[in-house]
Image (tube, grey):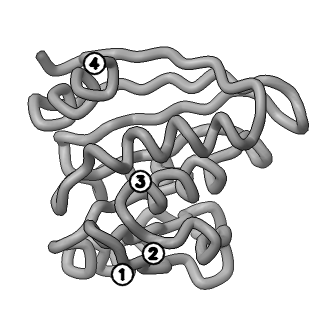
Amino acid sequence: MSGERRQVTAPTAASTREVGRRLGALLEPGDAVALHGPLGAGKTEFVRGLVGGAGGDPGEVSSPTFALVARYGGRVPVVHADLFRLDEASAAYDLGLEEIADDAVLAVEWAERAPSLLPADRIEVTIEGEGEGERRIGLVARGPRSAARLAALAA
């Protein structure tokens, strides 16, 4: 079941948030989402939807580029990290994400900067596209728990 894949087209920022919302409604504490894509692709918009789907207020979500980590409440709390400004992967480990995300969903933008920070069983989200144009959102499960989430998303 690992390796489950989904591809979604999102013509607007609102539809990018909606894909995140649908996924967020399925997530449970301990789940992890690794976000990939260029600047302006819509990673933070996706996280806004994820937070909303998890029962939090999507209006509270901003890019944590300067704070690096933000935590949002809800049915399931979401810990949102942005590794863009980290110069070295070792700096990411100092954030202590494992501890602060014990009882939450972990969503990490620019996850490729410290891939070993995330659990092996995670959902990889790749967003392609920039500006006001259409987005292509690829979702890949990296383990049985994540595969079950993506299977439920497709149902």
Res 151 visible: yes
Q: Quadrant of the C terminus?
A: top left
**Residue at the (17%, 73%) spot, across then down:** 103
Q: Quadrant of the N terminus?
A: top left
| Dot 4 amino acid type | Ala
Q: Tell me residue 82's x, y (percent).
A: 55, 65
Of discs 2 and 3, which sits in the foreground?
3
- Secondary structure state at the residue bearing disc 3: helix
Q: Residues within 10 Å of mark 3 (few under 14, many from 20)?
A: many
Tell me which corner region of the image, top left, top right, bottom left or bottom right, holds residue 14.
top right
| Dot 3 amino acid type | Gly
- Secondary structure state at the residue bearing disc 2: helix
- Secondary structure state at the residue bearing disc 1: loop
Q: Residues within 10 Å of mark 4 (few under 14, many from 20)?
A: few
User: Dot 1 corresponds to which residue?
Assistant: 94
Res 87 visible: no
Cα separation, mark 3 vs mark 1, equals: 29 Å
**Residue at the (12%, 37%) spot, across then down:** 145
Cα separation, mark 2 vs mark 4, equals: 39 Å
Cα separation, mark 4 vs mark 1, equals: 38 Å
Q: Which mark is residue 91?
A: 2
Q: Tell me residue 27's x, y (percent).
A: 25, 49
User: Dot 3 corresponds to which residue?
Assistant: 53
Q: Earlier in the sequence, mark 2 or mark 3?
A: 3
| Dot 2 amino acid type | Ala
Please report contact status of discs 1 and 2: CB closer than 8 Å, yes or no.
yes
Q: Tell me residue 73's x, y (percent).
A: 37, 78
| Dot 1 amino acid type | Asp
User: Dot 4 corresponds to which residue?
Assistant: 155
- Secondary structure state at the residue bearing disc 4: loop
Looking at the picture, does residue 82 appear above or below residue 144? below
